[in-house]
Amino acid sequence: MNKRETWKTKVGLILAAAGNAVGLGNILRFPSKVALYGGGAFMLPYFIALFLMGLPLMIIEWVIGRYAGRYGHGSMTGILGLFFKHASWARILGSVGVAIPVCICMYYIYIESWTLGFAFLSVLQKLPQPVISTDAHEAAKPYIDFFRNYTSPSATAYLFLILTLCINWFILQRGVVKGIEITAKIGMPLLILFGIFLSFLCLSAKNWTGFEGLKFIYNLNFSGITDPKIWVEAAGQIFFTLSLGMGAIATYASYVRQREDIVKAGFITAGINEFVEVIIGASIVIPAAFAMFSAIAIPELAKEGTFRIGFMTMPAIFMSFPVGWFISFVWFSLLFLAALTSSLALIQPLVALFEDEMKWSHTKAVTVSMILITVGAHFSAFIPHFIDELDFWSGCVFLLLFGLVEIVVFVWIFGINNFYNELTTYTKIRLPKAFVYTVAFVSPLFIAFVVYFWVIKELKNTLFTTDPYKIFARVFILLILVLLGFIAVKSRKIILKDVRYLRVIKE
Ligand code: PHE
């Protein structure tokens, strides 16, 4: 039986978990959404969703991760199985929680490779020369063409994709402690440093005009409170940014020592993530755009899409600063560090599945995981609409539904008292029982509301398609689900013979 690794240091554990949560979601997705939904009008539902849904779910995933790690499970397949005597249906349902991060990673890692490529191109001074203009579109035009060319995909893009895959492969092969933990220990402080530097630069731009951007975000107001779409987007952002609803946090939590204070770890993870989102994330993209273009341009720019801002508008702005290539390099390095520590977290559940459930060696588990991700990343690079389709299904629909499953199983079926016992063991922070009731009743209601408005409404518009590329992407997702479901059932026999499982039965 393989001995499972545990995080070596407390700092390492916290930084790894923060690295998991802090990603492109904080630096790119968050400002785009805020801009699109009216700044302060978005922030109120955002904070409410954070407290009613984000924090409770974060704590659940930590509690359950530590609990499952005790019995040798780190993937949702094994974790869900654990609660139902490893019945096949439970393990199959759990494997949806592995399919989600796998599918997200298949496009996330491709976007990650753009950030690495653009960081290099900045240093080599290969980015287009800036056109100084107060018209955002005119200023961005050379960068739009450049980006389109790059992602067509060009040979350079392909080279960096392969390089990014190799970097992820290498780190994961080194394991949880020597790979992920060390990367986070180096990457996270650097990321925060770069983030603070860029925040200062953007806020102070054009005689502190950038500050207006921050005011736009924090002009909290009630004007969005009756718009379901804003609620839905705010809740979606909370799920995405905190890495919730797919077991990615639970997988990391399964590698803690049994006496680890997971409540504290959960709050710190959420705290760091929110710092990088609502302080640093809020102080770069929007203030920079405010300083360089007019306030009217902001929602216009956001409509261009989450990633366009990062790869077209921002370089256009940064390249017009003195030593633009250097600032652009810092920007793309910041994005790369954020993305790297998240892509590792997106692959680890699959590695854990192979190691814990199939009892494969670490090398075999990592190799097979990376081959799968590599195939998917190629589809993301070469098949049109593949990224959007995967993002819609795995980054949105399944995520919400699986969040609900998590609450039902881990709180209701496990039992409020059992959950409360786990929650209050080895922790200095004794959360009141009211917290568990919030988790049990308010959070699912909140998610159900979101599912109703988002999924039901969006689904109608999206479900029917004749686009062969979209159909291909859907068949692909289905195949991933079938493959993981098959593994869930096949590995069941191995688990039933595991001594740790026999211990569960005795208990
Ligand atoms: N939270 C990450 C971000 O903000 C995305 C992510 C989701 C990472 C799930 C890991 C797991 O970009």
Image (cartoon, rainbow, N blue to C red):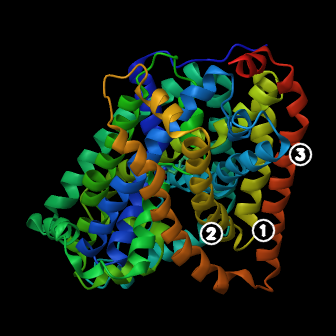
Q: Mark 3 sits on what residue?
A: 486
Tag 1 and tag 3, C-beta contact below 8 Å: no
Q: Amino acid at mark 3?
A: Phe
* Residue at horizontal 68 percent and vertical 28 percent from the top: 73
Residue 52 location (% of width, % of height): 37, 56
Mark 1 sits on what residue? 473
Q: Position of residue 266 (x, y in %)?
A: 40, 36
* Quadrant of image for the N terminus: top right
Relative to residue 290, is residue 11 depicted above or below? above
Kindly report the distance in space between the C-alpha atoms of the residues bearing marks 1 and 3: 20 Å
- The residue at label 2 has a CB less than 8 Å from ligand 1: no
Q: Are marks 1 and 2 in contact (CB under 8 Å)?
A: no
Disc on the earlier residue, 3 or 2: 2
The outermost residue toward the left is 207
Quadrant housing residue 319: bottom left
The residue wearing badge 2 is: 392
| Left or right position of 228 against 78 | left
